[in-house]
Image: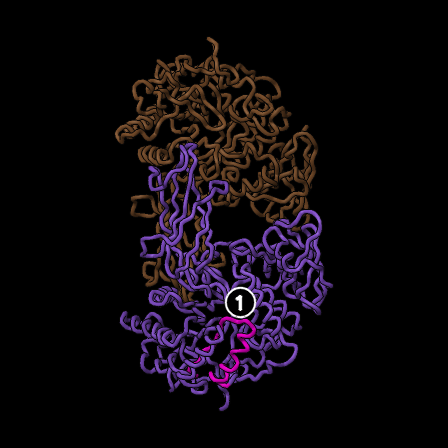
Chain colours: A purple, B brown
Amino acid sequence: MPAKAVVGEKVRVTATIFKDGHDPLAARVILTADGEPKPQAEAQMRSIGNDQWEAHVATDRIGLHHIVVQGWSERGGPVDPEDAPDLTSSDPHPLWVDRERALVGAWYELFPRSFGGFAGTAERVPAIAGMGFDVLYLPPIHPIGITARKGPNNTLTAGPGDPGSPWAIGGPEGGHTAIHPDLGTDEDFRALVEATAACGMEIALDYALQCSPDHPWVGEHPEWFHHRPDGTIACAENPPKVYQDIYPLNFWPDKEKDRAAMWDACKGILDHWIERGVRIFRVDNPHTKPVAFWRWVISEVQAENPDIIFLAEAFTRPKVMAKLAEVGFSQSYTYFTWRTQQHGPDGLWAYVEDLAHGPVADYMRPNFWPNTPDILSGPLRHGPPAAFAMRLVLAATMSPSYGVYSGYELYENSPASDTNEEYLNSEKYEIKHRDYDHPGTLAPLMTSLNRIRREHPSLQRLRSIQFHDTTNPSVIAYSKVSDDGDDVVLVVVNLDPYWVQEASIDLWQLDLPDGGTYPVRDVLSGEMFEWSGKKPYVRLDPMYRVAHIFDLGDPTGAASAIDGGGTQATA
Amino acid sequence: MPAKAVVGEKVRVTATIFKDGHDPLAARVILTADGEPKPQAEAQMRSIGNDQWEAHVATDRIGLHHIVVQGWSERGGPVDPEDAPDLTSSDPHPLWVDRERALVGAWYELFPRSFGGFAGTAERVPAIAGMGFDVLYLPPIHPIGITARKGPNNTLTAGPGDPGSPWAIGGPEGGHTAIHPDLGTDEDFRALVEATAACGMEIALDYALQCSPDHPWVGEHPEWFHHRPDGTIACAENPPKVYQDIYPLNFWPDKEKDRAAMWDACKGILDHWIERGVRIFRVDNPHTKPVAFWRWVISEVQAENPDIIFLAEAFTRPKVMAKLAEVGFSQSYTYFTWRTQQHGPDGLWAYVEDLAHGPVADYMRPNFWPNTPDILSGPLRHGPPAAFAMRLVLAATMSPSYGVYSGYELYENSPASDTNEEYLNSEKYEIKHRDYDHPGTLAPLMTSLNRIRREHPSLQRLRSIQFHDTTNPSVIAYSKVSDDGDDVVLVVVNLDPYWVQEASIDLWQLDLPDGGTYPVRDVLSGEMFEWSGKKPYVRLDPMYRVAHIFDLGDPTGAASAIDGGGTQATA
């Protein structure tokens, strides 16, 4: 299975290399774009002990690449590998290289119907871009079924004015390639894509392979659905959830020609929107469809358009999430929403360590969402503003990709019930009008975080994350280093949104000044602090601030902090 | 690469199994001997969470086997897998099955020349068998070179009476298929093999592929050696050691026909001794010869004689040791000799965990040696008798295979120097006459340990080992369970040979009685103890005893201890 990287990303390659006898060895990595004779990159490897060797390579080209490691001996001094009689090459290891947005991006999700359709949404885009977001993700924009339409709060009967769930796709006006008449026309959609691009953002569309009972496919292609013995079609389920308003597709019709036609039709949906300028798809519940389909459709699409990005909304078991990443998804939703502590089964430390350095790290990229239209959980439920700020800082600084669903900045905190993870009066079933200009929203913090993410390349990477012991389980601390080593950021977050928490942070892993004091800048508040030693003390009052983001400059600790002023601010 | 097992060993097979949708799944493991159509074993797998499934299989046949995992869905109830339309089979995974001695054995090493040759050794065998040893390992028994012969204490000049190192193989009398005239004749050797077998033991011979300058091959096959530009041959090295008295072989002569002849000659040595009843070879420094040679020679030999066992004396880097196991060695020497603490870089806990459950556990089997003729280390150097007892208990109970070099039972503790790991007046360079009948030797402890190893199948396995926290770093505790779960043994060892150490042992992982007291028997001393709860207290005075070996019976804790008496001894 291919490992994944983005253009310009320094990819660490390691290999176990040894030979009988005692001759000194040398080794190199060769990175080649698929089908190209000339390497994209080549690097000498260095021995790092235990017969392990490492090197870093990068490429500016997207698409499939191959990594080959070569080793040889150098008994009498340096040898040109082309002449080495014992030159030994590894099998090629595939590396899929995406454009940068597959790894790094701040996502903002909104329901265009709550903004008056595409035209109203286009008016809102400059404000969202102004907060520093990169991707505008729209839930399905297609006609919505009437049959079994859901009413407010997921009730089974809709009134005449109820708009229904956008995921109940398809009606007399059309299916997955049609646009809901209330949102606008094909031209309005193209205009929204353009307006978004003009602000430096791009659109992500929902790819939800299911049909309302009124979807044209239900009548035109009954063979694409599961029929009960009585001829009726069973509704979709994603246990424990039941979707009474949608039919699942049957990805394995009895006849091979029907299967091929149905898969082609599913790919046709992507082609349709790609043709309209969409390059990112957020895929709804991919784990309820066959892995074989995803392997096929992603490779088909990326063979023609290697810049297309797929985000898997796979809130499912770890092995299934990993499998979807393995067969081609560029990114995946995660369990971040439920990881609210530092340690233990709900612990962020072990979970993020696993994502960054565990078996899936080579090919699964996380996208951290503090909330989604489906999920209001943990400290956000009835939570104070500090809870929203805290979870936002964690998402934006832990993962290079993160996203929020609109309303987050307004601290919407009412759950559907004590036992239900959804929102009360969920926007999935009704139109919402919000006052985004209300004073005191989280918009300024979002704007700061997105600015800091752009200014600090360390925050655009996951694999360099390192956690630091703290003396208080409610205070979590982690640092990140940029590919070139010049940018080091330390994030310290109070996980308790109600009480002041204090801690000492053990930074023994970082190359900080040994003696004397040194200045450190908090890039979130702009304040300067004077530290000495490697165990700084922090105090976080959630009424005032939930986190520090310290710029530790280059790995020697304080260079950029000194560049940044060197004077001590009044804290 | 094949995993390894022995006949009758329950092999745990795990697999990640899932399918799109929500149908219940079933799975099985099929174990087949290579080339046989009918399976040796078949077992239903059970789900153990996280999409992992497991089952255990065993076989009574030696040689190559294949493991296949099959999964299928059972929507409407149990389905015969032969009829399952979605039956999915894994690729076959190879499993090499050895006879039991490849995993389990107590080894005893002696220099036959110190016993008056083969005849004198044969007289000593009943006493060694009486101590419960399984394998009698003899250093090379071949003629020894005169040129550059080593004198006492590895000096470079030998006197007329000095016998030289047995590893300097070859003289006018012959090479690797000849017998040193002082040891006896071919008939004497056959008699020793028979005498050993009559006592229930077997002989392991040294396979040391190197030649003294007087070895017949040096003159007959100069193309099998590395020549310097001046025509001389360089001596062997295994840095930092230099072997002035031996030449290394050149396993890659320029001409392919020379290489083939040389490799065939090396295999011929094994064939020669196999023909004389030898089924175990201890291979000297295999890491200084090509991996490709070992892969070839072991597979050639085992294709004809699958019961032949190879022990790698590879005191080298971890990756190289693992590679040798991967290409076919049945067992390997280890770093046990230098692991003397519970935790830290010299820690036994992490090291044994890695051997039992780490990446090499499937195919590398350890053989633990407290000492060898080359290695007197750690607490044994100038150490008291308790140090010898303690290291013996650790070796014999941690690893199913372990061995000692004779003299150990006499507490020989004088190192060659403060900076040299070898023995003073090493038997490698001179003949030793010892008084094995001296009162107070370790022979009774060796006898007890080997008896306990035979009586307790849990001690014949490595992969079930589990360490237990103790309140004292000088007290290490670990338990083992037999394949059938009926035998559970807990070993507690004082790692400090000088001082009394006390500790509580945290046995939360074991299924011990919750309330009240229960009796536990120490099978080393025969004493009964009364325990309550899961944190027993132990006190080990090295003047009196270095370890407890508790029989915890079946996993419910006390059944066999109750069988063993139920009365409380006066401790």
**Is residue B490 located in the magenta-colored stretch of the structure?**
no
The answer to whether residue B299 is left or right of residue B120 is left
Give the extent of the magenta segment: A116-144
Quadrant of the image for the N terminus of chain B? top left
Would you name the residue on which mark 1 appears?
A: A402
Which residue is at the far right?
A570
- Across and down, in percent, residue A368 comes to 53, 66
Quadrant of the image for the C terminus of chain B? top right
Does A90 sit above or below residue B161? below
- Across and down, in percent, residue B369 comes to 52, 30
Which amino acid type is marked by label 1? Tyr
- Across and down, in percent, residue A559 comes to 62, 54
Q: Nearer the viewer, residue B308 or B226?
A: B226
Does A494 sit above or below residue B195? below
The answer to whether residue B432 is left or right of residue B145 is right
Helix, strand or loop at mark 1: strand
Q: Residue at position x 28%, y 69% from top?
A: A256
Does A43 sit above or below residue A472? above
In which quadrant of the rendered view does residue A183 lie? Answer: bottom left
Q: Nearer the viewer, residue A481 or A395?
A: A481
Q: How many marks?
A: 1
In which quadrant of the rendered view does residue B181 lie? Answer: top left
Mark 1, other Cα within 10 Å: few <14 / some 14–19 / many ≥20:
many
Q: Work out whether residue A257 can be spotted.
A: yes
The answer to whether residue B468 is left or right of residue A122 is right
The chain under label 1 reads: A
Q: Nearer the viewer, residue B460 or B67?
A: B67
- Across and down, in percent, residue A324 comes to 43, 63
**Is residue A132 located in the magenta-colored stretch of the structure?**
yes
